[in-house]
């Protein structure tokens, strides 16, 4: 079982080299982006999906796992609070009534005062009271949308904004914000519709061409993206951003000559746009035009001698064309600088590791370490690159050079343990984590990792002992109690498992993992089915698109004898998680109860195909044999 995924998100075009116009247009959408949903789990076999949900995960390469939080929406949205005088002078709602019962002015003012005190819930409550008095006030709705966004309640913000747009269908500013909200919450079709409408109403809105075209690029609809950017440059012929994006689209389509012409045009309009030069370098590289690439790198470095991306690119060009001494002359100084300039290593992660160009990253780092062998951070990044190249022993050698004082020590230690695990050397992973814990006994994550390795070895007593020690550090850790519940389940200690899951729910009432795990466990045992249904409904409320939780609820209905209802939910679960053998088997069970034997047999066979080699396939084979005999007793 692969417990983690070390791939990192692919990055877009480098921010410093883009026009502010492009940054503002694309950055505005990012403000509304939420967290990706993770997989939901349910108790089945040790290798089932529920194990991967809360088992410790390997850290993201290139940055400490707990030290780089995502920016909070409230930190970046506009709307700093005004002082009292400005606040009063800028209120745009009716203030005709100054006496008698509170009016919308009073509630709005109270909302702003609550916001100033940091009481976001109170601010939202009083703004809603203002809207109860004047439900169609557009200013109040905009303010409420802003508060919902600050409070990360994107769905509610969308609902208010949809109402606003419904009453003001030709308000360009509203439609633009609505499109950005739609895009940020993943409704790309809705975002496209909004942007198309804006361009229909206001074709002079240059930003919208960028937003719409980039949406099509993101979805790989290159022809449509090209149409949008063509309209943009037709209307704004001097827009270097438009020509650059035309080139980028043509490059994606493999039309290199057209792409190069667009990039050259963007450079003629904006000579400092190095992103266009880097794109031309990519085209030249694809065509084997090394001299052209070198000329472009030198143009960049002539204006910006410290451009790290260009220095790395030129060094790699020299290395690949056999000019090793020239490559060394570039990389040795960078190696010496990297210890005091973290941005150098950050660029390697961004440009090469994140883009899965691991071999290039390894070349650069190996050369840089020749002059700065003590740079522990460089050893860590090189270890990550080598591990992704399936050069595990070399990766471990570099990761071991990351000492306890490095910000990457925790990541490196966990990475080493997982490399031992991948090599089938779980005992080495256990020994290494035990030594790591001795150096950092206060680290809860290390103990969770160690417990997961014991669990994989089926050394359940050792795993429980490790987790019990972890409770000494964090007695109210939902993760620790959850893992203890899973291990008790694996040992057949159902009551202890149920108690542990109840503890998780006590600590985190909305913990979908524990709600689902406990509910499914009760359903499997055929007991407390009403409670099981309630628990899983709560889990499904947290993650309505999760196939595993949907399956759990279907299985509750199956156990209750509500086979039609069970089948409906299980059909949805199959659509959401089509390759899970347990869900496929459950679907077969429900169809068999409904007398749909041929369909049941089909799902049993699909379940057998999807089961892992280590799974017990006897029970499903028996179901297939019995049902096949029932359908055709003579075996015809």
Image: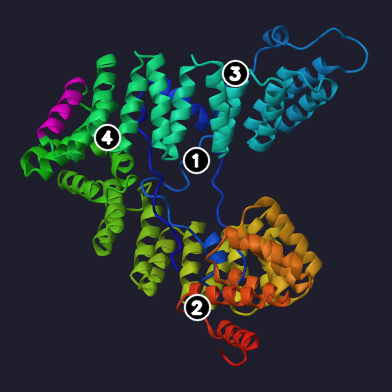
Cβ atoms under marks 4 and 2 closer than 8 Å: no
Whether residue 552 appears in magenta in the rendering, the answer is: no
Give the residue displayed 78% in from the left and 27% down from the top. Answer: 128
514 relative position to 5: left or right: right
Whether residue 297 appears in magenta in the rendering, the answer is: yes
Tag shown at residue 255: 4
The residues tagged by marks 1 and 2 sit, at their Cα atoms, a distance apart of 35 Å
Q: How crowded is mark 2: few (under 14 residues within 10 Å), some or many (20 or more)?
A: some
Residue 630: percent from left, percent from top: 65, 87
Question: Compared to 471, does 603 lie above or below?
Answer: below
Give the residue displayed 41% in from the left and 35% down from the top. Answer: 217
- Label 1 residue SS: loop
Residue under circle 2?
459
Q: Nearer the viewer, mark 1 or mark 3?
A: 3
Give the residue displayed 43% in from the left and 32% down from the top. Answer: 224
Q: Which of marks 1 and 2 is nearer the N terminus?
A: 1
The residues tagged by marks 4 and 3 sit, at their Cα atoms, a distance apart of 36 Å
Q: Nearer the viewer, mark 4 or mark 1?
A: 4
Q: Which of marks 4 and 1 is nearer the N terminus?
A: 1
Residue under circle 1?
69
Residue under circle 3?
173
Q: Nearer the viewer, mark 4 or mark 2?
A: 4
Q: Which of marks 4 and 3 is nearer the N terminus?
A: 3
265 relative position to 329: left or right: right
């Amino acid at each position: 079982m692969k417990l983690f995924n070390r791939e990192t998100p692919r990055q877009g075009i480098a921010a410093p080299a883009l026009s502010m116009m492009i940054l503002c247009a694309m950055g505005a959408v990012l403000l509304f982006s939420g967290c990706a949903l993770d997989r939901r789990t349910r108790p089945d076999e040790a290798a089932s999906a529920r194990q991967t949900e809360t088992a410790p995960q390997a850290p993201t390469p290139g940055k400490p796992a707990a030290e780089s939080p995502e920016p909070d929406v409230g930190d970046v949205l506009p709307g700093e609070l005004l002082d009292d005088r400005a606040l009063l002078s800028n209120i745009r709602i009716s203030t005709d009534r100054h006496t008698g019962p509170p009016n919308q002015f009073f509630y709005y003012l109270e909302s702003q005062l609550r916001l100033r005190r940091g009481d976001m819930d109170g601010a939202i409550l009083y703004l809603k009271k203002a809207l109860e008095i004047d439900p169609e006030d557009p200013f109040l709705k905009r303010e409420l949308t802003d508060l919902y966004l600050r409070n990360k309640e994107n769905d509610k913000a969308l609902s208010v904004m949809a109402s606003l747009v419904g009453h003001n269908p030709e308000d360009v500013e509203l439609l633009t914000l609505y499109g950005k909200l739609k895009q940020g919450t993943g409704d790309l079709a809705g975002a496209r519709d909004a942007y198309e409408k804006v361009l229909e109403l206001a074709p002079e809105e240059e930003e919208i061409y960028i937003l719409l075209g980039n949406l099509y690029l993101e979805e790989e609809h290159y022809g449509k993206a090209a149409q949008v950017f063509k309209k943009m440059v037709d209307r704004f012929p001097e827009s270097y951003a438009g020509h650059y994006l035309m080139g980028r689209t043509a490059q994606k389509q493999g039309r290199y000559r057209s792409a190069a012409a667009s990039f050259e045009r963007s450079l003629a309009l904006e000579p400092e746009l190095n992103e266009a030069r880097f794109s031309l370098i990519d085209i030249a590289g694809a065509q084997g035009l090394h001299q052209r690439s070198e000329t472009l790198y030198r143009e960049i470095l002539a204006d910006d001698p410290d451009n790290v991306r260009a220095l790395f690119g030129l060094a790699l060009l020299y290395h690949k064309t056999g000019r090793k001494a020239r490559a060394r002359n570039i990389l040795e100084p960078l190696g010496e600088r990297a210890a005091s300039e973290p941005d150098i290593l950050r660029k390697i992660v961004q440009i090469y590791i994140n883009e899965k160009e691991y071999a290039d990253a390894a070349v650069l780092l190996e050369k840089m370490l020749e002059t700065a062998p003590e740079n522990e951070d460089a050893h860590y990044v090189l270890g990550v690159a080598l591990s992704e190249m399936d050069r595990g022993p070399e990766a471990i050698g570099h990761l071991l050079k990351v000492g306890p004082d490095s910000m990457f020590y925790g990541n490196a230690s966990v990475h080493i343990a997982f490399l031992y695990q991948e090599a089938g050397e779980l005992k080495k992973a256990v020994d290494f984590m035990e030594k790591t814990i001795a150096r950092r006994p206060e680290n809860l994550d290390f103990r969770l990792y160690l417990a997961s390795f014991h669990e994989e070895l089926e050394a359940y007593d050792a795993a429980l002992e490790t987790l019990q020690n972890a409770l000494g550090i964090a007695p109210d850790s939902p993760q620790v109690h959850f893992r203890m519940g899973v291990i008790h389940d694996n040992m057949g200690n159902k009551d202890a498992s149920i108690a542990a899951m109840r503890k998780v729910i006590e600590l985190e009432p909305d913990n979908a993992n524990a709600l689902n795990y406990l509910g499914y466990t009760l359903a499997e045992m055929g007991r407390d089915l009403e409670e099981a249904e309630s628990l899983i409904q709560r889990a499904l409320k947290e993650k309505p698109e999760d196939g595993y939780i949907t399956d759990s609820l279907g299985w509750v209905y199956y156990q209750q004898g509500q086979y039609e209802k069970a089948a409906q939910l299980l059909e949805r679960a199959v659509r959401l998680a089509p390759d899970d053998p347990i869900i496929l088997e459950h679907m077969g069970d429900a169809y068999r109860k409904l007398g749909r034997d041929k369909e049941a047999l089909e799902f049993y066979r699909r379940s057998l195909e999807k089961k892992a080699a280590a799974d017990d396939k006897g029970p499903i084979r028996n179901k297939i044999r019995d049902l096949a005999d029932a359908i055709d007793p003579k075996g015809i």
